[in-house]
Amino acid sequence: MQIAVISDTHRHSYSINRAADIIKDMDMLIHLGDNVDDVEIFKENFKGKIINVRGNCDFTSFTPRERLEEIEGKKIFITHGDKYSVKYDLLRLKYRAKEVGADIVLFGHTHQSLELYEDGIWFINPGSASLPRDSFKSLAVLEIDNNNVQVMLKGIE
């Protein structure tokens, strides 16, 4: 299963449309918030399942702040990350991941991509699709196949 993970699109229509082209044939899209309403643009051409959470800039959304989903036998904790102070460190997020029994944690908020495997848990931040604080606009592709997990970061030009 191929899962597109995207965060921090911030209403940037050019980047959203470029990302939509990249992910159009994937099985699932997970949007990690800021701005969760951008999911409506993805829905125009994306045929797979869409899961989303709201971020700190999603003031009027009734979308949940976090979710725990089981996908292909993996427990995936999905959050924007601001609630766990991820701009400073991952300590609170790691505690929460262990508390919920997550195999994979997806988070955004920092606008910097990260792929880290620690203590049997994947921590994946796709970076920002619109306003990166590292070198490029990005999204992540999470592949889960026969209990194997692969993570790839893809640039959005």
Image (cartoon, rainbow, N blue to C red):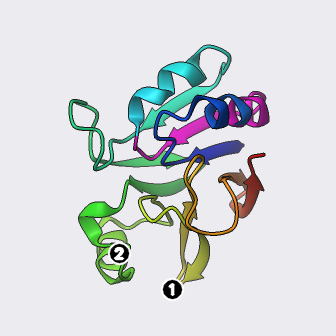
Percent position of residue 19, x then y: 69, 37
Is 25 included in the stretch rendered in magenta? yes
Region of the chain picked out in magenta, as a range: 19-34
The label number, if any, that marks residue 119 in the structure image: 1
Q: Residue at x 49, y 27 (%)?
A: 39
Callout 2 environment at 10 Å: few (<14), some (14 to 19), or many (20+)?
Answer: few
- Name the one closer to the observer, 17 or 61: 17
- Name the one closer to the observer, 117 or 18: 18
Quarter of the picture holding the N terminus: top right
Is 32 included in the stretch rendered in magenta? yes
Residue hosting label 2: 98
First along the sequence among labels 2 and 1: 2
Q: Residue furthest top?
A: 44
Percent position of residue 73, x then y: 56, 52
Q: Residue at x 65, y 37 (%)?
A: 15
Percent position of residue 134, x then y: 62, 69
- Name the one closer to the observer, 58 or 3: 58
Q: CA distance from mark 2 to mark 1?
A: 9 Å
Find numbered disc 2 in the image and state the secondary structure of the residue it sits on. helix
Q: Amino acid at mark 1?
A: Asp
On screen, residue 42 versus residue 84, left or right, reads right
- Name the one closer to the observer, 130 or 101: 130
Residues at marks 2 and 1 touching, judged by CB atoms closer than 8 Å: yes
Find numbered disc 1 in the image and state the secondary structure of the residue it sits on. loop
On screen, residue 29 versus residue 59, left or right, reads right
Q: Residue at x 33, y 83 (%)?
A: 91
Q: Amino acid at mark 2?
A: Lys
